[in-house]
Amino acid sequence: MLGTAKIFFSAFKGINGRKTPADFENERIKMEGKVHQMKMSLVPWNGHTINDITNDLDYNSLKWFPSKLTGYIISPNNENLIAFQRIEANDCRILAESTEFKIFMEYNYPELTVDFNGIYLGKIVNFMQILDHDGYLIGHLDRNNPSDSYTVTFNSGREIKIRKSRDNKGYKRKNSMITRRRGKLEPLTVKTEQYTPYSLINVRYHDLDFEELKWIAAIAVFESVNYSYTFD
């Protein structure tokens, strides 16, 4: 009974957004433990680039309080390239790790904050302004446009095109039930349209400086993990 009460209280806190800073830190530690364990199944980053970040996800999902999406970003060669976990309640937290880098992002409207390899990189405000770790404007983007891509423009004048992702779950369940001949009720599963995954960016390394590469990697990971699956 006590265990059930603890689970209910934890869910209640998630619904009402009453987590303390200690709760968030404990959640992050658990995410790091989970994702670090998953790294054992990753291919080495050597020989890969950020162009290999796709919207092809191999995942397990749990819709609860909070909801969790745990899995891998798959490379164009069908390899486990990046391990990730996304936890979503009133806000969204994503931890993604390759054998080369670790990105932690927290989205609490209107700000997306980004840590890269344990160091605060900066934040994106309203998916328009990119601010560095000191709060200076270093670039902008506009994902809210109606096209299927958007451009990240840095103050250096360098521009990178990002292809948008969308919910690519292969199957969706209807709420209704169907009855088999044996009289057993089972959920009705309906296949959606065929979906072909794709790389989200195409950039040459010398086109960007090191800090800009970090930003593009973080934006591409967020695009893949956040937009390729919705908890519906």
Image (cartoon, grey):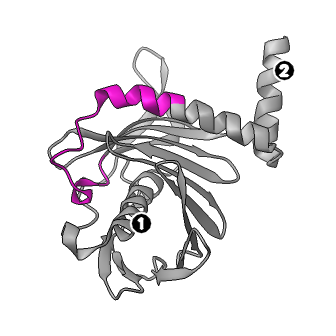
The residue lying toward the viewer, choosing from 227 and 157, is 157
Residue 202: tell me if it is visible. Answer: no
* Residue 123: in magenta span: no
Q: In which quarter of the image is residue 21?
A: top right
Residue at numbered disc 2: 5
Q: In which quarter of the image is residue 176?
A: top right
Considering only vertical position in the picture, is 77 above or below 120?
Answer: above
Classify mark 1: helix, strand or loop.
helix
Q: Residue at 79% x, 14% y: name it.
A: 3
Q: Along the horizontal axis of the image, is 218 left or right of 25?
A: left
Badge 2 local density, few (<14 within 10 Å), some, or many (20+)?
few
Q: In the picture, which quadrant includes the N terminus? A: top right
Q: Position of residue 19 (x, y in %)?
A: 80, 43
| Precedes in sequence: disc 1 or disc 2 | 2
Given the image, on which type of amino acid does mark 1 rest?
Answer: Trp
Q: Where is residue 114 in the image (x, y as percent from the top left)?
A: 54, 59
Tag in front: 1 or 2 = 1
Given the image, on which type of amino acid does mark 2 rest?
Answer: Ala
Q: Position of residue 86 (x, y in %)?
A: 52, 44
Classify mark 2: helix, strand or loop.
helix
Residue 30: tell me if it is visible. Answer: yes
- Chain part drawn in magenta: 33-56
Q: Residue at 47% x, 82% y: name it.
A: 140
Residue at numbered disc 1: 215
Q: Residue at 26% x, 66% y: name it.
A: 201
Q: Along the horizontal axis of the image, is 47 left or right of 122?
A: left
Considering only vertical position in the picture, is 195 above or below 62?
Answer: below
